[in-house]
Amino acid sequence: MIGRGRWPTLAAFLAVTAAVVIMPAERSGWAWGGVLSFLTAFAITVAIYSLFTLGLNVQWGYAGVFNFGVVAFFMLGAYAAAAFTKEPAAGGFDTYVGGLGPKLSPPFLQSEEWLPFLVGALAAAVMCGLLAYLLSFPALRLREDYLAIATIGIAELMRNVVVAERGLVNSERGLKGIPRPFYSFFSPDDYQYFYLLLALALLALVFWATERALRSPWGRVLRALREDEVATAASGKDVTAFRRQAFVVGAMVMGLGGAAYAYERGAVSPDTFTHFAGTFIFWAMLIVGGSGNNRGALLGAYVVWGLWIVSLQLLGYPLPEALRVRIFYLRDLVLGALLVAVLLLRPQGLLPEERRVSLWVERLLRRPAPEAAGTRPAAGRAPTSGPPPR
Amino acid sequence: MAASTSSTNVLEVRDLVAGYGEVEVLHGVSLRVAAGEIVAVIGPNGAGKSTLMKAIVGLLRPRAGQVLFLGEEISGLPPEQLVARGLCYVPQADNVFPSLTVQENLEMGAYLLGRRGRERLALAFALFPELAQRRRERAGRLSGGQRQMLALARALVLQPRLLLLDEPSAGLAPRLVELLFAKVKEINAAGTAVLMVEQNARQALKLAHRGYVLAMGQNRLEGPAQELLDSPEVARCYLGE
Amino acid sequence: MTALARARTFAQGGWQELRYRADALTATLLWALVLSLLVASALSSADHFAVGLVVGSIYALAALGLTLIYGVLRFANFAHGDLMMLGAYLAYFALTGAVVGTRQDVHLPRALEGLPAASQRLGDLTFGYGLLLATLVSCLALALLCIGLDRLVYRPLRRRRAGVVIFAVASLGLAIGLRSLMLLLWGPNPRLFVEGVFPARHFPFGVLLKSDQVFTFALAVGLAALVYLLLFRTRLGKAMRAMADNADLARVSGIDTERVIVWTWLLGGSLMAVAGVLLALQAQLNPQLGFVVLLPVFAGAILGGIGNPLGALLGSLVVAVAQEASVGWQLWGHQLDPTYKPGVAFIILIAILLLRPRGLLGART
């Protein structure tokens, strides 16, 4: 075990920060203006991806819902946001539903700068929540590994639909020219700083909300559930309802993430939403950072995306051709290996969860251990719930 | 009964501490089983009886204390190795392989012997003729009583020195319990020592030579089975149906 | 027994009977659906049906490996598809000795295709005995790799009694790693074992199949039969089934479960390698293909009843036939877009998980 101490966390954070700051600076000849712009782009992506890891944490870390189809919500959120803010389809080669942008811009308060985007983001969240709600009925009855394969399938099916149905969201061509909130207020160069503030504000809001939810009575039930589902059910709580709620809330957060992503990129297409880039990477971030733990979700996004950027930066250095061509594959390999290493050596992740379980759960846990053979592994759900039974 | 010195003890448990995760269930339990004895461990629910079994047989790693089998330390050894030494265990629930036939179940009991194991099955079938009639049936289709018999037979194929039984009467009708216990007596008479954990305290003590009372993960009482049966304290606390 | 106790047993028996009947009902419905699907597609388009059988037999081998590993090791191996593909690439490497270089492939000085007449086509097949040898090499290599991965990753997790989820995530991480490895060594461009266009043979009912495909089907069925024999007639096979039922009970019976696990990986790994080679023969060598076949293989294994080898065979055939036949289906007046082919597998999967998770032949849990 790589210790339970804080030093790996600090080391990882410092290493990533150093690499992310020094590499571009050194390569650009210490032109800090360019570096600042670069770091801003980096921070925006980390902020947006953190939304996904936070949402995943609510689903998995809080309620043990094993969602391996995050990309489905990512996709839905991004496309929904685009549909609500773009101009209607021009016809010809571009065909898609929605295009409510102009309809949502009544001519006052310069509403075209913000109202469609607000509506789009809310729509993204609502639609994702709705999808999660509908899925939860069949999904929550499944055992975890079956749920994983089912969610993978749902995501793939969604991609199928997007590509196959020509008129839906422009299939493979994707949607381009998604407008950005308050774009006309800033010069193109300065806009990203504004967007960073916007993204950070959104992240702060979501973080605050999820933390509050965790410490609320609702959150306590979820934590008790994770520790021991049997006891919690026995005390009269409707286990499935709580998990459904967590699933929906997490999905809504992911929807917001999708919207933020769409506005920032300005274009989305089915290629963006692969299993690797839309599901696996968030799981890697969450596990590396510390699952069951909101701060860990943020740190994980930071560290993993930092790794990503570093690999891109490495391309700028004179490398042998053989290595240069393979950088991205090496990066993916390292990420996969990192995930496995974390699971083996430090399963609680970089930021271990605080053991803050309420008195009520403590009392529940002090009852005698189950004597029947072959109990289902309730304690195996979350990797951070203390030392595993031997 | 021979004097119970460590040299004739088949099993000795000294101050065993064990538990699951953060919860400690056994807080220092001791017992012994001499050659040829039937020892019963009784006590209320939650006393740690099953945990004790699992810790002895290697399904659970003890946190402190010792387990000695035939004079050798076995604490922490995996169950496969204990079977080779002559210690066989019958779990309380899920104690047969449901998708395997009766014959195949017994073959698993004889797994260690490789291909020669098949000869040993004849002994098991001799002891349990009802099973011989059903050798090609899937174990999952057997009735509760037949399953218990099969579970017991499976553990006996290797003619172990010590048999560990975890609540063998659980879920059985009284008539079947009598039958089962009669079989256990037969097995014991043939030379196998038996350590039995039981909810059905009265029946268990009637069968056993000696008994231990376990409560809250600790030893409470011990002594010859008849003494425990006659004791008013035991009757009051542990023998009520 | 008192009258009350007798009444209670009777009521319990009645309830059991009802559950048994309801269960039998879903089973009958499912079988009826499956058989009618098979018959309908066979009748409507024999050609698609035949291709479905071929693809299904490949899935079946993969599903066999998956179901074995699931039964004995108790986890859904999400790296299964990528391991299959790696098996194909390992055979390719054994055959040609080629890895991707900067502008051109880099070759080992010797490779199996250098053996005399190794590439000479065997009868009507597109490949020579070189590929067969290469496949054997790949079986061994992949099996050893699986054992290595088990030692390195899965066994520590087993020791720790980690939950199902951890295993799944770990296998996903391994899947990504393996895919990257394949991309690193052989590049993203698809490859073929044998270049060239080969004519298909004509069979009755308008069925067009290449000899390779017939070979695939025959080999897959043959291997499945061998696996079946192993599981039901050998001591090791029975131990595997016993472990699939109850691993702890297997241990207290004296079975060395770690040994059985090694054999399971040997067997599963070999099945994966052969399935991978057959898949690459049928389609192509492509690092992304592993993930694409993961869903249909899982669907097949689960439809048949996870843990049951015969079920794996049957379920995979059904899924593949459904996928191939779906191209001819009509939905709301529109022809179903071929893009949806993988979606068919998913729909089957979801339906089974909801209606009858233990599939056609799975054991009652």
Image (cartoon, coloured by chain):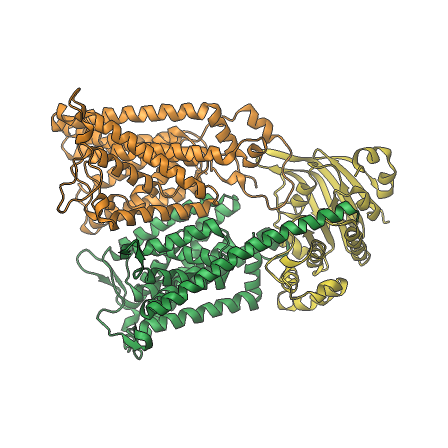
Chain colours: A orange, B yellow, C green
Spot occupied by residue A357 in the image (x, y as percentages of width and height): 51, 26
Of the pair C199 and C353, the residue shown nearer to us: C353
Examine the rendering and report whether any part of residue A69 can be seen.
yes
Residue A275: image location, x then y, percent:
32, 46
Residue C48 relative to residue B184: left or right: left
Query: In the rendered view, would you say B82 is above or below A123?
Result: below
Q: Position of residue B175 (x, y in %)?
A: 79, 52
- Specify whether residue B171 is in view: no
Q: Residue at x 31, y 61 (%)?
A: C89
In the figure, A294 relative to A152: above or below? above
- Please tell me in which quadrant of the rendered image residue C328 appears: bottom left
Q: Is residue C278 left or right of residue A368?
A: left
Tell me if B75 is positioned left or right of C320 in this view: right
Residue in the picture at 32% in, 32% down: A125
C206 shown above or below A99: below
Please tell me whether residue C300 is drawn above or below residue B50 in the rendered image.
below
